[in-house]
Amino acid sequence: MSIEINHVSLKLGNKVLLDNVSTAFHAGQLTIILGPNGTGKSSLLKIITQEWETQGNLRFFGRAAQDWKPAELAASLGVLPQSSSLTFAFTVTEVVELGGLALSAPQRQIAAIAQENMQKTDVAHLAQRLYPSLSGGEKQRVHLARILTQLSGSSRPPILLLDEPTSALDIGHQHKTLQLAKAQAQAGATVVAVIHDLNLAAQYADRILILNHGHIVADGTPAEVLVADTIEDVYGWPVQVIPHPTEAYPVVMS
């Protein structure tokens, strides 16, 4: 287990976002978190990144979260947020190379790693563009390249947290991004992603968690979790679930 969460609760004002949640995430696995708006998906990621304090216990690689030095943990844990407030007129290359600040490597090596990750996320052709001039989807892909650069020097299988990584992407880049996330998991990383598209989750997830009203209401493979009764109960909308005509995953139809 790379991440262990035990009896975590979170309340903001009068709203309970997470209620006594316990779960774990494993190396070599792409876990996708689903659920309605405002049900605690992004909140769970923010607890893992310790952006929000909460009741409960959190462990990374078997060690309590509070026992990690921030720089030490940053070498093995990368986070793609929903959006970034970066407004400086950096080029795309400069933004991606910021991930190299976590590496003990010469600048020439960092530049080569950054270039490789820009190729993976399909932003190499934007190398000299100024970051503020990019579209939302291009910015997401640039930051994914930056995070992959950050994690390239990890001494252990890294943790990659993705908060709605496909929200601003066209269909081709949605699939390419999740293919990349899947490849990272197959290479040994722990990958946890929050998305809204049930069919993308069905196609790429090794494991799906569904959150509702602050609780985990389903946990398992896509075939186990994405069933009509569960989806209708959680989302309040009737669906049919059929097998994909040529692949093994379920397809959700409204």
Image (cartoon, grey):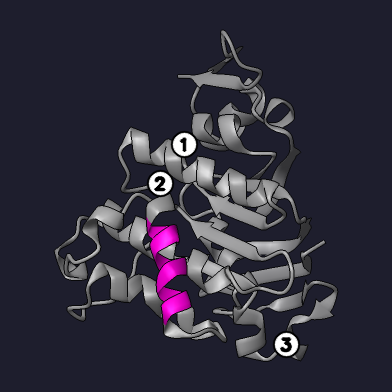
* Magenta residue check for 47: no
Left/right placement of residue 119 relative to residue 158 reads: left
Q: Which mark's residue is nearer the viewer, 2 or 1?
A: 2
Marks 3 and 2: in contact by CB < 8 Å? no
Q: Is residue 63 left or right of residue 174?
A: right
Q: 18 or 84: which is nearer to us?
A: 84
Region in magenta: 108-118
Q: Secondary structure at mark 3?
A: loop
Residue beneath disc 2: 166
Please tell me how crowded label 1 is: few (under 14), some (14-19), or many (20+) other residues with Cα within 10 Å: some
Q: Are marks 3 and 1 in contact (CB under 8 Å)?
A: no
Query: Which label was assigned to residue 68?
Result: 3
Which residue is tagged 1? 197
First in residue order: circle 2 vs circle 1: 2
Q: Main secondary structure of the magenta part?
A: helix
Can residue 99 be seen here? no
Q: Is residue 71 visible?
A: yes
Q: Is residue 172 above or below residue 46?
A: above
Secondary structure of the residue carrying numbered label 1: loop
Q: Residues within 10 Å of mark 3 (few under 14, many from 20)?
A: few
Contact check, label 2 and label 1, Cβ < 8 Å: yes
Residue type, mark 2 in image: Thr
